[in-house]
Image: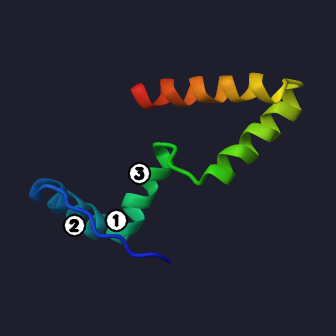
């Protein structure tokens, strides 16, 4: 597992500490969950997902990638 140093506001740091204490989780696990919910994944994972969707939907690689990119863009705007 890799280590990462980030800078957050004092308020966010306090909220992370409180949430970790309240839920019995680590700050790292809370941050990882947030990143996963935002769709932050390795490119290989995204390519696998597009390949599965393309096979299931009968789309070409270009069509499936266009749909995946649009859905990602829309979900990040929320």
Q: Secondary structure at mark 1?
A: helix
Dividing the picture into quadrants, the one containing residue 55 is: top right
Are the residues tagged 2 and 3 within 8 Å (C-beta)?
no
Q: Colour scheme of this structure image?
A: rainbow
Compare residues 48 and 27 and report the one nearer the observer.
Answer: 48
Which residue matches tag 1?
23
Q: Is residue 62 visible?
A: yes
Dividing the picture into quadrants, the one containing residue 33 is: bottom left
Q: Horizontally, is 60 left or right of 64 in the view?
A: right
Q: Residue at x 58, y 23 (%)?
A: 70
Q: Is residue 78 visible?
A: no
Query: Between disc 1 and disc 2, whose residue precedes?
Result: 2
Q: Residue at x 30, y 67 (%)?
A: 20
Q: Residue at x 29, y 69 (%)?
A: 5
Q: Horizontally, is 56 left or right of 47 in the view?
A: right
Q: Horizontally, is 13 left or right of 69 in the view?
A: left
Which residue matches tag 2?
17
Query: Between disc 3 and disc 1, whose residue precedes?
Result: 1
């Amino acid at each position: 597992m890799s280590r990462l140093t980030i800078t957050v506001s004092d308020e966010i740091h306090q909220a992370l500490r409180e949430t970790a204490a309240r839920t019995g989780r680590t700050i790292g696990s809370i941050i990882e969950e947030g990143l996963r919910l935002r769709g932050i994944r390795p490119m290989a994972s995204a390519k696998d997902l597009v390949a599965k969707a393309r096979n299931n939907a009968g789309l070409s690689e270009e069509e499936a990638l266009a749909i995946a990119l649009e859905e990602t863009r829309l979900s990040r705007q929320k």
